[in-house]
Image (cartoon, grey):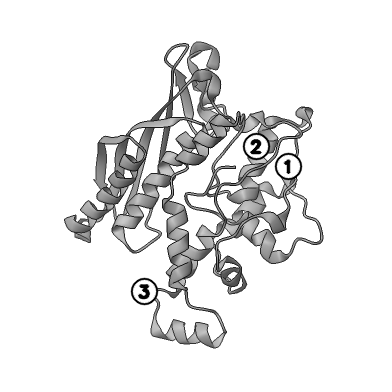
Amino acid sequence: MRQLAGIFPANEYPDVLIGLGEPDDAAVYRLDDERALIKTTDFFTPIVDDPWLYGAIAAANAMSDVYAMGGDVLFCLNIAGFPEELGMETVAQIFAGGAAKVREAGATVAGGHTVTNPEPFYGLSVTGLIHPDQVMRKGRARAGDRLFLTKPLGTGIITTAAKLTGAGESRAHRLARRAQGKPDIDQKHLDEAIASMSRLNRAAAKAAQAGGVRSATDITGFGLLGHASEMAVAAGREAGVGFRIEAAAVPALPGAFAYIAAGYLTRGSTRNPEHFRQHVTFAPTVSDAQRTLLWEAETSGGLL
């Protein structure tokens, strides 16, 4: 998207405070000296079997970018695609889960657009509001700042474990997997991951604003190390900014390390190191499992 920045020069659009040329989580447009709009869009294919929970998680994930900027959600539009054979009852449950989460955010779903698609997808176009001087940006970290992570890691690992060992697994695959000592998904672990993914980052954003936080992002597809790398690079080497993360202090969801050992990994475990390895150095004491957790993709993760 940054390649399009030349079509819309910043000096021609002075009210676009954050646009195509910036690495931040959402666009910001100044309405006046007191108000700015935050705009973002996000959607994905199902990561859990329950349609209501899928809708709720997708909505929480989409609104997270507004919270990462420090704003409040005003209203949302549904963005969805479903195969014709899915059935209206299932579609209605997905929309209901998303709507419930938007309502929890103190906002409303005001419309949307749905298309026919072979694979289901659902998400939101989100509009938020913030004071122009209170936007939390990736590039405002400074030497001496403390890092706070508001949710544990492991959602991508646990949902992958559920997918690989769930109801859709063939009997032959299940027998072979168990013979190799690879565990079934523990429903308690999945429930905790779902609770984490469904939890809004609204309270974390309000706490950050109250505490005078300047810089933030949300942890999603690039994993903790990928998103932390983006923040450090955006802050600039001239600012003397580098992040030191104590691997053992990073919170993990129950079961995450067991599923890492079983090899239940997302593509993020290989893609993220490929993209961000040049920015990261590990101490010898950081185990392979810890490194995997820090690289792994998250869904509706916390704020950093």
Residue hosting label 2: 231
Residue hosting label 3: 168
Residue 234 in percent (x, y) is at 66, 32
Callout 1–callout 2 Cβ contact below 8 Å: yes
Residue 105 in percent (x, y) is at 37, 39
- Residue type at mark 2 is Met
Residue sitting at x 68%, y 61% = 290
Which is more N-terminal, label 2 or label 1?
Answer: 2
Q: Is residue 90 visible?
A: yes
Residue hosting label 1: 243
Which of the pair 146/161 is nearer the observer? 146
Name the secondary structure under disc 3: loop
Query: For the residue carrying disc 1, how many other residues have a C-alpha within 10 Å: few (<14), some (14-19), or many (20+)?
Result: some
Name the secondary structure under disc 2: helix
Nearer mark to the viewer, of 3 and 1: 1
Query: For the residue carrying disc 3, how many other residues have a C-alpha within 10 Å: few (<14), some (14-19), or many (20+)?
Result: few
Query: For the residue carrying disc 2, how many other residues have a C-alpha within 10 Å: few (<14), some (14-19), or many (20+)?
Result: many
Which is more N-terminal, label 2 or label 3?
Answer: 3
Which is more N-terminal, label 1 or label 3?
Answer: 3
